[in-house]
Image: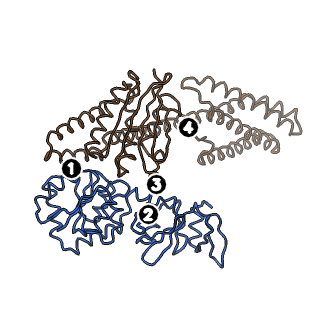
């Protein structure tokens, strides 16, 4: 909710001075017209403070309900009703307070039109100020949101790009190719082809699309093949697919396998196996990725940063469920299980 | 000239070997696939220079250097590591970005050969003393105990105590010495959980069960293990901020 104009100090000062000078002016006019000063004092104070009250009521009601542009009949009605109520209440109160009630009452009746008109104008003025104020606030808020949204989307885009390119992986792969060119040019050629296919696959895919499990597994196969060249005999990978024909959102498994590589391969010193198993159960595609890890030095799943939390987030955005990604640790084996509802 | 290559990728080691053929005066006496092997090999062979990768399993290149008593001259080779590169730039240390050319590699080796032995060692030491920028080093401390290397994750630390030129790191499994300064740890450990409560102590605030007044303006922090540590006036103020009091 935007801040109320009533909370700004500039408005408060203006409002206060308006109230005092209006009261003084009315007192002066009434005494000039021959009213006893005590009666004039009651009259000017009560009617103007009540009018101030009515103005605040208008301001507050506009804080909660701002009429759409060009629908100001509601506002007009509100001002007329408040003006009438204001006139009636101030009359009743002053008549009660002054001694010669009868006489004053007839004086009030004579001036009722001008009182009503002043009240209506004052309340209307207040209403207009508030409408302008809130419209301006809305505008500022919208601009701010837009700037913020732009900034966020740019940041996400950049992050996404950086994530996709994986500079560490890319440069190390190029370094391996550089080494192979001298000793085993044929193998260097194969790796360049694999790396190109992998990068093309990464870049062409839109986040929203669905793809077949076969295509996704083939893409992961390329990734694992490149890592195998980099790390030689240390890495062995198995991919089993018992869910032919299943569908899944594009690039959903990639961060999971990257995570498995990060803890299973980059942070261990022995020979390791990374296994990817896909099967169907009920109306779900279930993919399980297992990798070893060292429980003493790493806590996968906790503090994995971008990797798994981004998968969790994507699953939530796609299916509005938090239970589709699960991780378990058993001694030094880390298992990530993902369930994908089939369309 | 004796050289050791330390890199976890076999092909990355082979390209260095290949390029080094242009320098017959440099002999490769060992190749290591991780930091643990690297330390052993350095102790055993006392090389003049090592070619060192940064990102390696368990302990990275910097952590490995910290554990070597007299680190030799180092030529770093890394693929992409913003933190490391920043550190090299501040210390004017030459480094190779993978993949590097034969020419670029040759320049780095020639530069090393042109330096005196003292110069070479000095550069490495000043780097090891001050590198705190690696994010991995804010999660763990690597120490050597007996002949073994121990990785202490930060939550396992109870407190740190000054001990002459060393810092004694206390964990449930015992105390370990590390040749760093208290000032270094005061700066590099996360301030939300580690507080310098005294000139000689840095405490893991998660371990504190009670703080009792003790003499004039001093206090005593009582840890879960029952250990009592002095808290100075300034330390008490810092502790209060860290605990949100």
Q: On what subunit does the disc labeled 4 rest?
A: A
Per the image, label 3 sits on a secondary structure element best described as: loop
Question: Which structural element holds mark 2?
Answer: helix
**Chain corresponding to blue in the figure:** B
Same-subunit check for callouts 3 and 1: no
Q: Viewer-proximal residue, B101 or A264?
A: A264
Q: Do labels 1 and 2 share a chain?
A: yes
Quarter of the rendering containing residue A133: top right
Q: Nearer the viewer, mark 3 or mark 4?
A: 3
**1 or 2: mark nearer the eye:** 1
Q: Residues within 10 Å of mark 4 (few under 14, many from 20)?
A: some
Residue, disc 2: B188
Q: Nearer the viewer, mark 4 or mark 2?
A: 2
Label 4's element?
helix
Residue in the foreground of this view, choosing between A340 and A236 = A236
Q: The brown chain is which one?
A: A
In the rendered structure, find residue A296 and report the number of the disc placed on it. 3
Which residue occupies 43% across, 31% down?
A: A287
| Label 3 close to label 4 by CB (< 8 Å) | no
User: Quick one: label 1 or label 2, which is nearer the N terminus?
Assistant: 1
Q: Residue under circle 1? A: B99
Horizontal and vertical percent position of residue B139: 45, 57
Residue B228 position in % (x across, y down): 61, 72
- What label sits on residue A135 in the rendered view? none
Q: Mark 4 points at which residue?
A: A133
Q: Distance between the residues labelled 4 and 1?
A: 61 Å
């Amino acid at each position: 909710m935007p801040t109320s104009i009533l909370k700004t100090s500039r408005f408060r000062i203006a409002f206060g001075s308006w109230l005092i000078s209006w009261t003084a002016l009315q007192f002066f006019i009434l005494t000039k017209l021959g009213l006893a000063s005590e009666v004039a004092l009651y009259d000017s104070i009560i009617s103007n403070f009540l009018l101030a009250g009515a103005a605040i009521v208008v301001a507050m009601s506009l804080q909660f309900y701002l009429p759409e542009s060009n629908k100001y009949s509601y506002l007009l009605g509100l001002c007329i009703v408040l003006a009438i109520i204001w006139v009636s209440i101030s009359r009743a109160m002053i008549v009660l307070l002054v001694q010669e009630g009868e006489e004053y009452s007839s004086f009030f009746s004579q001036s009722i039109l001008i009182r009503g008109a002043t009240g209506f104008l004052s309340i209307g003025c207040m209403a207009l100020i508030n409408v302008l104020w809130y419209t301006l606030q809305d505008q500022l808020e919208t601009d701010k949101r837009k700037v913020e949204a732009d900034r966020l989307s740019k940041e996400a885009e950049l992050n996404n790009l950086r994530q996709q390119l994986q500079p560490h992986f890319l440069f190390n792969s190029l370094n391996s190719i550089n080494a192979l060119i001298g000793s085993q040019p044929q193998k260097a050629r194969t790796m360049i082809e694999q790396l190109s296919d992998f990068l093309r696959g990464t870049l062409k895919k839109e986040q929203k699309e669905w793809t077949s499990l076969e295509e996704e597994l083939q893409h992961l196969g390329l990734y694992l093949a490149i890592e195998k060249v980099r790390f030689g005999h240390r890495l062995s990978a198995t991919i089993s697919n018992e869910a032919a024909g299943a569908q899944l959102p594009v690039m959903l498994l990639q961060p999971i396998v990257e995570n498995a590589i990060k803890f299973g391969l980059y942070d261990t010193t022995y020979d390791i196996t990374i296994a990817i198993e896909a099967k169907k159960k009920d109306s779900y595609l279930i993919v399980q990725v297992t990798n070893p890890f060292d429980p003493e030095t790493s806590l996968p799943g906790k503090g994995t940063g971008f990797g798994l939390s981004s998968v969790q987030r994507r699953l939530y955005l796609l299916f509005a469920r938090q239970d589709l990604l699960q991780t378990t640790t058993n001694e030094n084996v880390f298992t990530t299980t993902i369930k994908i509802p089939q369309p | 000239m004796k050289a050791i290559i330390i890199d976890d990728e076999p092909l990355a080691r082979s390209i260095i070997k290949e390029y080094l053929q242009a320098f017959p005066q440099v002999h490769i006496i060992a190749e290591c696939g991780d930091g643990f092997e690297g330390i052993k090999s350095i102790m055993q062979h006392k090389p003049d220079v090592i070619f060192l990768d940064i990102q390696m399993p368990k302990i990275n290149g910097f952590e490995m250097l910290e554990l070597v008593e007299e680190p030799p001259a180092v030529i770093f080779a890394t693929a992409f590591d913003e933190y490391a590169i920043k550190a090299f730039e501040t210390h004017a240390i030459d480094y190779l970005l993978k993949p590097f050319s034969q020419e670029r590699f040759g320049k780095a080796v020639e530069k090393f050969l042109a330096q005196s032995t003292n110069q070479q060692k000095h550069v490495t030491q000043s780097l090891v003393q001050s590198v705190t920028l690696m994010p991995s080093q804010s999660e763990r401390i690597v120490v050597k105990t007996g002949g073994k290397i121990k990785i202490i994750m930060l939550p396992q630390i109870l407190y740190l105590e000054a001990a002459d030129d060393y810092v004694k790191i206390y964990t449930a499994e015992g105390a370990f010495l590390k040749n760093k300064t208290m000032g270094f740890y005061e700066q590099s450990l996360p301030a939300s959980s580690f507080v310098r409560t005294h000139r000689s102590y840095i405490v893991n605030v998660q371990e504190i069960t009670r703080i009792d007044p003790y003499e004039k303006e001093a206090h005593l922090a009582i840890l879960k293990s029952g250990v009592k540590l002095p808290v100075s006036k300034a330390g008490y103020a810092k502790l209060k901020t860290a605990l949100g009091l």
